[in-house]
Amino acid sequence: MIKTDILIIGAGPTGLFTVFEAGLLKLKCHLIDALAQPGGQCSEIYPKKPIYDIPGFPEILAGDLTKNLLEQGKQFEPGFTLGERAETIDKLEDGSFIVTTNKGTKHHAPIVAIAGGLGSFEPRKPMIDNIDTYEDNGVAYIIKDPEVYRNKRVVIAGGGDSALDWSIFLADIASEVTLIHRRNEFRGALDSVEKVRELKLLNKINLITPAEVTALHGKDKLEAITVTIDGQEQVLETDHFIPLFGLSPKLGPIANWGLDIEKNAIKVDTLDYQTNIPGVFAIGDVNTYQGKLKLILCGFHEATLMCQSAYKIINPGKRYVLKYTTVSGIDGFDGSRKEAPKAVVQSIN
């Protein structure tokens, strides 16, 4: 039996940051994740993808963000159960929980924080008859290593942030990048749309809209695609076709835990992101509420407030006084203390 203060389901960015916020409150965390390594989608799907909206980092690769979060939290000695999926949850008479994985590993905690991101997921595939034939032979739904596409001809299909961001990123790596979207308008960030149009003017990206990829060609691997534009077909030679139409999320076993669920997301109270089950919280992309934004930044905020509420549940009647880390430093579990620089303390006092 693994015992901890806060059991975190999901070791993505939000789950990893929870370790740090909980550690400041002297609360111990243990994380469960079905993936074999921490980081969630940032590690598994797009470790080399740049992220632009993390405070203090004008640009950071998703994989590097994971490394930094692990480094930030390691002083609080979190535990990990990796490669196992949280399967069942049982509430005990004292209000604490037993969470058992698909491999039978049991975890006991008074607080459960579901930080499972989109949950389990699979890519949305375009309706092209022979697309399965070329999977891993020129067709990919996720970009894990951009170097695979160096000096190659790449066709990306999609109109969201992923399609735009990867088109921009690969413009300096691939020999040719073509972005195809079935509409003239894009769903992604306006800044990214403007950047794509700028790169088109510089002949660094071929932009074809409105259009659809309707057929794939090649003997042993992908060699060309058919693009349908206003009913007219055009064949383009290419080395890679990457349809980025998003992911189809599934909550998996968590959907059977008795939680209030709306459109495949867990409903929470925005006071502290607690679910309809007292002691069970949902933070990050897995939750939903009015005005919800699926941003890593928002997950960090939700994790911070959740930990404050968790502290009160674990320590009833005990008052916690918020201290800024610039003043109090960071207390470790081993009794050591990292003091804030004296100049900073003096300037604040």
Image: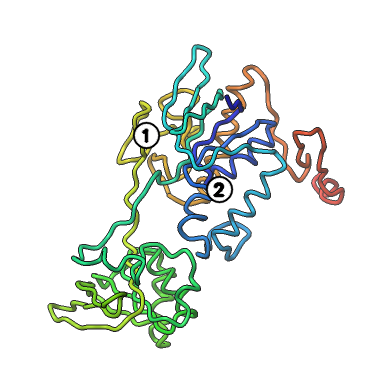
Image point (24%, 77%), residue name:
217
Q: Residue furthest top?
A: 93
102 over 36 or under it: above or below: above
Image point (46%, 83%), residue name:
151
Give whichever of discs 1 and 2 has the lower sequence position: 2
Left or right relative to 48: residue 76: right
143 over 239 or under it: above or below: above
Left or right relative to 206: residue 64: right
Q: Amino acid at mark 1?
A: Pro
Image point (48%, 34%), residue name:
273
Rendering coords of residue 259 (x, y %) = 37, 29
Q: Amino acid at mark 2?
A: Pro
289 over 165 or under it: above or below: above
Residue, disc 1: 253
The one of 222 and 316 positioned closer to us in this rendering: 222
Rendering coords of residue 162 (x, y %) = 40, 64
Q: Quadrant of the N terminus?
A: top right
Category of crowding for the residue at label 2, using alpha-carbon neighbours closer than 10 angstroms: few (below 14), some (14–19), many (at least 20): many
Image point (30%, 75%), residue name:
222
The image quarter containing residue 314 is top right
The one of 89 and 172 positioned closer to us in this rendering: 89
The one of 241 and 341 positioned closer to us in this rendering: 241
Label pair 1/2, CB-CB below 8 angstroms: no
Find numbered disc 1 in the image and state the secondary structure of the residue it sits on. helix
Residue, disc 2: 38
